[in-house]
Amino acid sequence: MSLTVILAVGLDSWKITAQSSVLRPAGYIVVSAHSIRDAIDHFKGGDFDLVLLDQSISVEDKERLTCMIRASGSQTPVVSAAHFSGDSHSFAEATLKNDSVAMLTGMGELLAIRSGMSVV
């Protein structure tokens, strides 16, 4: 089983800590970034399997950060957390409702598809 490293980006450190406490027991390694600048620095220096953008970041900043990630040549999937399940952020590979079950399920499915595994 390979390790999956997630860059979790959010302006609210409490929310990022809460997300990390759900993701770590599910087998993910989580690197937290509490600002856009911090996220850029981590991304440049790391090798991430997924970037998770918390709902505490404005949609405009999420899109700007995703554009910077794509401009670097990276194909790392970006997941945007949303307030409602019907929200859709076209710049992200997935927009998921910000609850632990939806996030774990959606991220797991996205990573499985990216790695070529079948989703059951």
Image: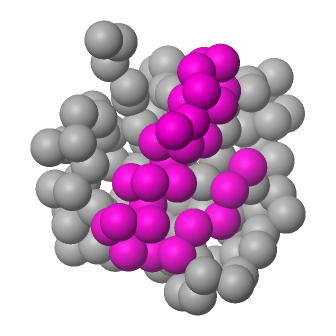
**Horizontal side, residue 72 vs residue 13: left or right:** right
Query: Who is closer to the viewer here, 26 or 79?
Result: 26
- Image quarter where the N terminus lies is top left
How many circles with numbers are drawn on the protein?
Answer: 0
Query: Who is closer to the viewer here, 67 or 118?
Result: 118
Residue at 72%, 38% (x, y): give it: 69
**Horizontal side, residue 34 vs residue 110: left or right:** left
Query: In this view of the protein, can residue 81 be seen by the observer?
Result: yes
Above/below status of 59 relative to 112: below
Query: Who is closer to the viewer here, 87 or 78?
Result: 87
Q: Is 111 in the magenta?
A: yes
Model colouring: one colour
Place residue 7 in its image quadrant: top left
Rendered location of residue 48, percent (x, y): 49, 27
Specify start and end residues of the magenta stretch as a single range: 93-120
Residue at 28%, 61% (x, y): give it: 19
Query: In this view of the protein, can residue 44 be seen by the observer?
Result: no
Residue at 44%, 54% (x, y): give it: 105
Q: For the view shown, which residue lies furthest in the top direction?
A: 1
Place residue 28 in its image quadrant: top left
Q: Is 33 in the magenta?
A: no
Rendered location of residue 74, percent (x, y): 73, 25
Residue at 84%, 33% (x, y): give it: 71
Query: Who is closer to the viewer here, 61 or 21?
Result: 21
Above/below status of 15 relative to 30: below
Rendered location of residue 82, percent (x, y): 58, 78
